[in-house]
Each structure stands twice: as structure tokens, then as C-alpha cells.
Image (tube, rainbow, N blue to C red):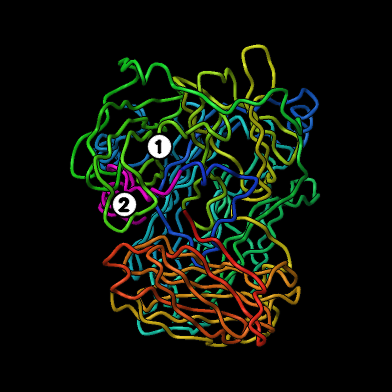
Amino acid sequence: MIDVEPLIGASFDRMFPVPAVAADWNDVLRRADAAHRRPQRRVRLALVLAALLVAAVAVSPLGAGIAHSLSDFSGWLQGSPGKPASPSAQRAFDRANGKSWAGFPRGTKLRELIKTSADGVNYTLFGVRSGESLCLHIVAEGAARGSTLSCSPLRELRARPQPALVLEVDYSIGKLVGKHAQVGPERLTLPRASVTFGIVADNVQAVHLRSDKGTRDALIASNSFLSVLPRPPVGDRVHTVSATLRDGSAVKIPFAEAPFDTNQGTASHGVLHGPANLDRVIKTGTVGWLTRREQRGAVLPKGPRSTMFFAHGGAHLVFGRLIQPDPGNRMRVGLSLWLLSKKPPHAPFMKKGLYLCTSLIAGSGGGGGCSAEAEMFARSPVNFGLSTFGGGNQYSILDGVASDDVARVAVYLGTGEVSTVPLRDNVFATQVSRAKFPIRVVGYDKDGHVIANQSMISENGPSGPAYVPAKHAKWKKLATVTNAAGGHGELWTVPSQAGGVCYRFGYPSGAGSSGCTPPKWKGGIRGVEIPTGGPDAVLIAQTLSTVTRVVVAYRSGATKTVAPRGGFVVYAVPKERVDALDRVTTITAYDSSGAKVGAIRAGK
């Protein structure tokens, strides 16, 4: 037996304090316009330790019957697998949980499920059941340390036709000091181990995982499974998970792969369901209780991190409240009004005036955004965002705000299931399985008419061969640039499997972006990264082979001519333009004859 209580205390202290929120303070409407959303395809997803909670899933009687006949999760649904955690581990959990802005209810019990050791590292898998939420928490100590928490709705277990549920894949534990691998522009530190874990039904005899390294069996105990892969090869990812039942039959378990390189590990296993059109169009909307300053929910948390509710200076809080959409779900959404008296430095996209902001709070992770109050519902009466905490976590959080016109919000999953989203005081927050995309988010009025309708093919944007580097292709460094703050960035490219190009732009610190462009697109130039301001503003655009020069124009009338290289233009906005808040307005491409062959409008 191993003594992990000190690490449990430290890991839960990291997991349940006030959240460190990554906010997109550009117009949140842009974030919510899912039909046109093209998120940057990141090389690495931020591994934020977040506790996600339950979505209420409406299940057909047939679906429930299939699930019950094939799999029985009664160990979790009706009992408490494993054994109680030690008193010291429980006390550490209680102390950390009490400090959280969105903690588990008081009295929540921690249970010990699986213990194992490998390559000098001791692992303990814990379980936490609270209301309609089930969470697994892995803790590692010894030659390497680490921990993470992943959760699933219990109602999904009741509806699940498969006998196992993956909660986390390929979570990295520790690092091998002095061991590195070069992948394109990045020098990666190799992890000491990677872990994959989840939940199994009572009749599961074995769980098999196939990764780049080969096939391996997971440990099974207490209705849970745990697989530890010591010293994994660089980029090793689990591609297949299957379960063998006691009668010898095998069942493939759907899940979303963890990302690596430009492959984001999306998993779209279904097709779009639900209504495809609007019954009536609404382009205005309000949140009446917020306008009337009614004391709904709870007061906004205060403290050094309260700036998460509005990240820019020059503004003061007019009014705000913290709402818990579902009493059985510990996620909260902050809704607040801020008066911006002057434009923030290096944020020319923001104007003076009143802003409506939303802020998701979920364990130590969160997200949010702001929009001018008058524009919040200009495109749709339902405004939402999707957050994924950790590349191998199997659930994303859908959260947002709805106008007073909306009586109900539903999510139609790619499997045909319909999730009724808890909506309270105009805000909502729910989990969405990454293995059940595409999804359709629909808002209904009090008469049942569809007044909001937006779809998302995957949580990370488009996927397929056009968005994956070609096998055995080597990354090529195309350009180097120094931004106004003195940071040295590099642009690397590689052919995609569909004949297009994948790119990675990064700094030595690891910051940057990546993505892939399709083999065919219209116009002589297309924007990849368009700067909005700030000392790290770098313009990246792709051009056709016929383009010989590109002219970058500023709001002041200043221009800069840049020559493409390898089909790309990389240009850092100089310090004098940044200091003057002189924003890029247009980027125009010309061929060798001087004819204009394309242009990009960068903003107003």
C-alpha cells in the first residue's frame, strides 16, 4: 500500500481553488457563431484541471432497454464501488473543496478504486460521486508526480449501450529529464508515462487499448479501468478501446482521441439531428432581470482573480450575479454588466460603453467572453461557447446566455440523443460528449417555436484528411519573424493528407497557433492569422503561386509591401504601429503584372 495523502491534498488544492480562466475578450458573438466558427487548431490543448458536470439527457425507452441488456453500471448507479479513502485523504479533499468557487456539495465522499505501480511511479485512481455526476481522479507520486480529474453524467451511463465509458485518454504524467523530441518547430519534453482510465459495467472482463506502441490490457477493479504506459514514444496515442464481456463477446467503445501535432483528436461518430430551420427570426433581445438589477443567484466572487469577469482595464462593474443553472450540478455561470469608460490599450476592437459578460466556473478551469450589451443577441437569442479542458478529456462544456425570448434550450447529439439543457435565469451550462459530435443547439420560445439554431461539426473545427499532416512528411521552416515585443517566432509547414498545407507558428515559450488549409480555396489570398493589436501582433496569410507581392494597409494610411515565401506571407506589425494603436485594415495581393488578384478586409 502507498501513502498518497500528501499528494492528494496538493492536487486537490490545485484542482479546486478559484478558477484560472482563459477568456476570449473579443466579441463573444464571434465565439458563439458556430456556423462560421473556425477555431485555431492548436498544437497542444491546455491541460487545465477542471471538474465537469452533468447534462440531462432525454433517452428513448428503446435506448434504455439496449443499454440495460448489454451493460449494467449498477455498481455506480446503485452502489459505491471501491472502498472509502483514508481519513487523511478525505480531509485533504474536504479542505480543498471548501475553497472552490464551484465545489462539490459538503459531505461528498472520496473512494479508492485502483492502485498500481510502474517504472518507479505509484498510481491511485479515486472516484467521486456527487448528485448526477461521477468523477474519476488519478494521482501519481514517486519518480513522477501528477493528477487530473475527469467527470461524466450518471444519466449517460443509464442510457449507454456500450459496457464501458472512457473518461480520459493519454494524460501525461511527469517528464523524462533531459529527454526531448523535435516535432516541427517544437522541442518536446517526453513524459514519464501516460494514463488512460474510465468506467466499466459489472459484466466487463477485460478492456483492451491499441495505440501506436501496440495493444495492451488495462487493469480492472471497482467498476473502473486504468491503463498506465511508462515512457511512451513521442506522440503515442490510443486509437482503439474495446471491452470483452464475461460471455466472450467484444464491444468497441467510442471515444475521442487525444490531440498531437495538428491532429486535434476529434471524434465525429454521427450525423446532425434536430430541426434544420428557424420558425421565426429574432435579432434583438434582453436579460430583463439583469437590466432591472434583481438579486438572482449569488454575489460574484471577490479576490485577486475576480478580474476574470472582465479582463481589460478602464472598466468598472455595474452589476453582476453568479448563477447555478442546475441545483444538482456544481458548475456556475457569472453574468455581469461592465461600463468601459475608455478603450483598453492594444484592443482597438472594443468601444466605450456597456458590456455584457459571461464567465463559466468549473473547478479550476473556466472561460468566458464579453460583448456590447446592445449586440449580444444581434445574431441569435442563444449565445454560447464550448470549452474543452485537457486534450484527452472526453467531455466539453457548453455554456452561454439566452435572451428572455428563449424558454428552453436543447442539444441534439450526433447519436440521435437529445439533451435538455438546464436553463435558469437566462444562463446554461452542460456537458457534451466529444464522441457524440456533430451537435445542434436549438432554442425554443414559450410556444415551442424554434428561434435559435446553430450546429457544430466538432469541438475543434473541421476534421479529415485535409487537416492531418501527410504520413512521413517532414516539417519545413518557412520563415522567421520578430514581433514588436522582441519575441522570435517561426513558421513551419508540411503537406496535408489531402494535398493542402498544415502550418505551425510558434515562439520558444511554446505560445503560438497551428492549423491546416484545404487544397482548394477561392481568391488570391486567404487570412490565416489576422492581428487585432498588441505587441505580439503577427500577420500570417496564404497566397497563390501567382502572387508576387502583398500590400498591408493601416487605418492611418500607412502601407507595407511584403513578398510571399513558399505560398505564405509572415509579417510582424512593427513597434511604432503597435504603440500608435494603428490597426491593419486590408491586405491586398498582386501578381507580376501589377493586377490585383485578391484582398482581405482585416476589420473596421
| 69 is higher (above) or lower (below) than 312 | above
Q: Residue at x 29, y 54 (%)?
A: 7
Asked whether 295 or 325 is in front, the reply is: 295
Residue interval drawn in magenta: 1-27
The amino acid type of the residue labelled 2 equals Ser
Which image quarter: residue 351?
top left
Q: Residues within 10 Å of mark 2 (few under 14, many from 20)?
A: many
Which residue bears the numbered disc 1? 372
Residue closest to the eye, 371 or 507:
371
Q: Nearer the viewer, residue 343 or 221?
A: 343
Q: Report the side of 440 relative to 7 (left or right).
A: right
Please state the horizontal and vertical placement of residue 18, each as a whole percent of the image.
28, 42
> Which residue position is annotated with label 2?
11
Q: Which numbered disc flags the more N-terminal residue, 2 or 1?
A: 2
Point out the frontmost of discs 2 and 1: 1
Please name the residue shown 52% across and 37% down the image.
384
Q: Is residue 598 found left or right of 247 in the rendered image?
A: left
In the displayed structure, 477 sits above or below 290; it is below
